[in-house]
Image (cartoon, grey):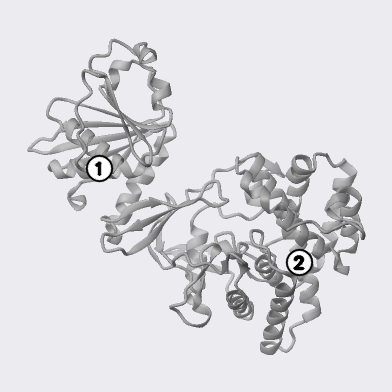
Amino acid sequence: MVNGMARSLEEHGSQPIWIVTLPDHDATEHLARIIAEEVRPGDLVTLSGGLGAGKTTFARALVRTLAGDPELEVPSPTFTLMQVYESARQAIVHADFYRLSGGYELVELGWEETTENAVTLVEWPERADDALKSERLDLRLDLAPGGGRIATLTGTGAFAPRLVRLKAFQTLVIRSGWQDAARLPMPGDASVIRSYERLVKPNGETALLMISPPRPIGPAVRRGKPYTTIAKLAETVNAFVAMDKGLRALGFSAPRIYGEDLNVGLLLIEDLGNEPVVDDNGPIPERYAEATRVLVRLHGTTLPQVLPVADGIDHAIPPYDLEALLIEVELLADWYVPHIIGTQLSGSARAEFVNLWTEALGEILAGPTTWTLRDYHSPNLIWMPEREGLSRVGLIDFQDAVLGSPAYDVASLLQDARVTVPPDLELKLIGLYARERKAAERDFDVAAFARAYAIMGAQRATKILGIFARLDRRDGKPHYLKHLPRIENYLIRNLAHPALGKLKVWYETYLPRLIPHADDPPLAP
């Protein structure tokens, strides 16, 4: 029935409106199922329309889908005012305000407490005056000339961009042949703007929906530019598309893109599976070795700096320049020091910190560059045993790629922020990388790479200490704090390299708990 719906999306003031033509009863029920897959606990859907417009059909289908029971009895709540249903996913509140005298009666019903964590559907919402929250999805059903119905959906508040994405998603899956797939939410990552869903067809075939709307422009933090611009973080989904195409062209296992909406930030991509490169004991050495060889091959290849996105659209891979590298290490001073250490750096201490990092990074900036994928570590690597050779390593996170030091991604893999890589395995795989690079390139400088590895490893560890503290304090994700001891150990390990001697003294002076004395036990991983 999806293909039979005529759709349009227009702006009404600042509110997006999606108009859907429903030719029959089945189409009305199908629209209800589409809405059911979109709404989450705490959402409000209001339903209006004249007699015979299909409100009862829509409401019953929506409640049954949300409850996961196609045979559920859904009586009209006209006389009870509201009916509450419990399901495994959430509570569902179905209300009919036809007999409501005014919004003040909602207090007597215990409305706020009942609907706070429920998906709520309200018929005759106008009877509640202004007592309902403004952030909602409004749906009006009207009889269409010549038969059928017309549904007009309006998103208000935070539901406005969600309605735009929902319409774009429906267009995308129809165009790509995935309109019959069910949508299943997936666990989130560290990103505050990107999310994923798994689509499952009736035959069991799966794909992933990547929801990555354009990044909002943040406040200026330096020379009129926001942090994301300075740190070279992707601002649109174009970067992912370009890098995906570039990696696949080189024979690497990045996901195929089945469909896209670049403006809204939706990608329908290949599901590479969920088999990791780690197990309960940590890194699986053979899989980490193959992941290391992927970097050997990538770093030994002459790579373009500009990649195509779509017709007439290119993506220039940004340089991992001094400004970006420095603003990342300063996250330590901005977040980790005050919120984890519980102190503040003086202006002179911070200035010395920046100056020492500027000096240490000088040789990195003067060294060789390559595609630095930037998030090359276990959560973003998928093991695909059905493929052969390096193709067994699936790559899924590279939208923030930059032109930077080859050592960065090697350190990202072998000093994994979420999984402890034993020092002996780290050393073994550094040796593997160096030997294979040297075998392919006679002029590969092993000693220079070792220095770069220590510097980039320390830069990355310093940055991540700040990021994980920020994820806890700003974004309400405290589970990242459990990884701090591991990252602190990596930082200590890197600071032991002579290339970082001056910085080691700074850390000893201003953050002494990070650099234990010789007779102190090491930090627990």
SS for tag 2?
helix
| Type of amino acid under label 1 | Asp
Give residue 330's position: percent from left, percent from top.
76, 49
- The residue under the point 72% across, 45% down is 223
- The residue under the point 83% across, 39% down is 344
Q: Would residue 259 be found to the left or right of residue 369 on screen?
A: left
Quadrant in which the C terminus appears = bottom right
Would residue 368 be visible to someone looking at this image? no
Q: Quadrant of residue 322?
A: bottom right
Residue that protrudes farthest toward the left in the picture: 146
Q: CA gap, disc 1 to disc 2? A: 60 Å
| Type of amino acid under label 2 | Leu
Give residue 331's position: percent from left, percent from top.
73, 48
Give residue 367's position: percent from left, percent from top.
76, 72
The residue carrying pointer 1 sits among few (fewer than 14), some (14 to 19) or many (20 or more) residues within 10 Å by Cα, namely few
Disc 1 versus disc 2: nearer the observer: 1
Residue sitting nearer the eye, 277 or 440: 277
Q: Would residue 154 be found to the left or right of residue 347 on screen?
A: left
The residue carrying pointer 2 sits among few (fewer than 14), some (14 to 19) or many (20 or more) residues within 10 Å by Cα, namely some
- Is 278 rendered above or below residue 392? above
- Is 197 rendered above or below residue 71? below
Q: Quadrant of residue 516?
A: bottom right
Closer to the N terminus: mark 1 or mark 2?
A: 1
Residue sitting nearer the eye, 13 or 339: 339
Give residue 173's position: percent from left, percent from top.
31, 56
SS for tag 1?
loop
Q: Which residue is mark 2?
A: 365
Q: Which residue is mark 1?
A: 69
